[in-house]
């Protein structure tokens, strides 16, 4: 096994609960509370990769800010938390926060989403590793059941079956579907033993759901949409039952919104009940300070820099582009019925996210001419370099 599931976990002690601040910043604005749900999911899912050294410093994740951010989210009705053992100590920090909040928010008031198969040291999709991983996640999250478990980043283990690793993949739904393994007469066809690893792992998750009840719903997650669709179809055909959910990331953004085309295929062709999108800021691509090492091609990264400069015309604070990106994803997600997983680190980010949803949902922001013009001007920058709706190679 690539992970030592029985190794002692790091300790992140919290101060006495009455010493944790609960100030005005910790209170929700009533008008922004989330009310609508999609198959039991709120419009926004709290992504907790931020509760790790991937995105934040050690003193941030070891302090009380993660707890305060989670509490504020719950007070807003943002009650689904997405984590993973791949995200460093995220499960531990989230579990500690939710345990401390149990008097105000008992276990049945929120939904826990985690993943199996990918770990900091590598991938392990064996049934034995999945059993051990689930047991550790239950322990770390201080619960006896998990609402959703994804098989994490399936494209690294499965046969991708892609005629090209980057580009616009919408043709997989039409004239190139045979090259992507998506012809109707290819449904249920495996290509290498890699696909059998996916089937074996999902079968184990189905057992944990159907026979032992420690999982409520099973999903697959990853980046390339054609691979996710092919595998979802394969699972239904070979195992006789569908996965409940599919999650992809960076495919409903200002730079790439091809999830809109793919979303409608997952239900009819693979029986998937819910599609979820993540990373509306495209792995920080659409921020003034993107990741130092980003998988997007140079042309996309340069266009994003120009978009940041353009956004300063309407917001000199540096928040113009990320705010627009979040609003855009919410607007499109609302239109097609897809919850959005957003990485949140601070109280301010929680407030900003629910405010953006309110502006889209209740105030009709996406119908306002000035907003539409801003969206088009940013997308034109990617269109000019022929990289709008362009998926980079799997990170």
Image (tube, rainbow, N blue to C red):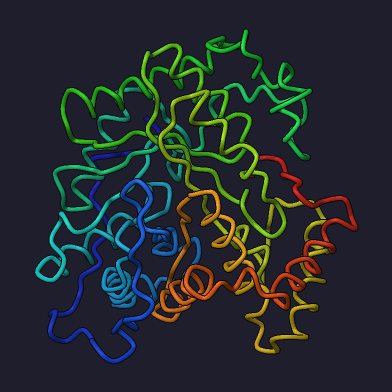
Please determine whether, in this image, residue 118 is positioned above or below residue 286.
above
Q: x, y (%) of residue 333?
A: 54, 54
Towards the viewer: 13 or 8: 13
The answer to whether residue 288 of the structure is visible from this angle is no
Residue at 78%, 70% in the rendered image = 305
164 displayed left or right of 89: right
Residue at 48%, 61% in the rendered image = 342
**Residue at the left extreme, as displayed:** 103
Please determine whether, in this image, residue 336 is positioned above or below residue 201.
below
Q: x, y (%) of residue 174?
A: 74, 25
Q: x, y (%) of residue 94?
A: 28, 61
Residue at 70%, 51% in the rendered image = 256
Towards the viewer: 325 or 9: 325
Q: How many marks?
A: 0
88 displayed left or right of 212: right
**Residue at the bottom extreme, as displayed:** 24
Towards the viewer: 179 or 366: 366
Quadrant of the rendering where the N terminus is positioned: top left
Q: x, y (%) of residue 13?
A: 20, 70
Towards the viewer: 203 or 270: 270
The quadrant where residue 264 appears: top right
The quadrant where residue 35 appears: bottom left
């Amino acid at each position: 096994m690539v992970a030592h599931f029985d190794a002692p976990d790091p300790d992140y002690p919290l101060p006495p609960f009455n010493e944790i601040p609960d100030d005005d910043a910790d209170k929700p604005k009533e008008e922004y509370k989330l009310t609508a749900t999609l198959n039991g999911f709120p419009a926004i899912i709290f992504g907790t990769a931020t509760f790790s050294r991937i995105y934040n410093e050690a003193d941030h994740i070891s302090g009380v800010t993660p707890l305060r951010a989670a509490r504020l989210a719950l007070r807003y009705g943002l009650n689904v938390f997405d984590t993973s053992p791949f995200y460093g100590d995220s499960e531990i920090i989230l579990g500690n926060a939710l345990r401390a909040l149990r008097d105000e928010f008992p276990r049945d008031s929120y939904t826990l989403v985690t993943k199996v198969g990918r770990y900091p040291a590598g991938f392990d999709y064996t049934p034995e590793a999945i059993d051990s991983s689930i047991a550790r996640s239950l322990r770390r999250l201080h619960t006896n059941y998990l609402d959703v478990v994804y098989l994490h980043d399936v494209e690294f283990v499965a046969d991708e079956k892609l005629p090209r690793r980057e580009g616009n993949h919408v043709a997989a739904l039409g004239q190139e579907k045979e090259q992507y393994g998506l012809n109707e007469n290819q449904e249920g066809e495996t290509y290498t033993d890699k696909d059998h690893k996916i089937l074996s792992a999902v079968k184990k998750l189905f057992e944990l759901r159907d026979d032992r009840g420690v999982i409520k719903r099973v999903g697959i997650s990853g980046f390339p949409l054609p691979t996710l669709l092919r595998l979802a179809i394969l699972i239904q055909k070979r195992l006789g039952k569908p996965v409940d959910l599919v999650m992809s990331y960076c495919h409903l953004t200002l730079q790439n919104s091809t999830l809109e085309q793919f979303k409608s295929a997952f239900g009819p062709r693979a029986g998937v009940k819910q599609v979820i999108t993540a990373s509306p800021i495209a792995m920080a691509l659409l921020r003034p300070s993107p990741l130092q090492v980003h998988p997007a091609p140079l042309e996309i990264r340069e266009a994003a820099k120009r978009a940041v400069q353009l956004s300063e015309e309407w917001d000199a604070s540096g928040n113009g582009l990320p705010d627009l990106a979040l609003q855009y994803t919410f607007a499109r997600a609302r239109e097609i019925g897809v919850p959005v997983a957003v990485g949140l680190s601070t109280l301010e980010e929680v407030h900003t996210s629910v405010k953006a949803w309110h502006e889209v949902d209740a105030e009709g922001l996406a119908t306002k001419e000035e907003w539409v013009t801003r969206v088009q001007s940013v997308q034109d920058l990617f269109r000019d370099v022929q990289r709008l709706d362009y998926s980079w190679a799997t990170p």
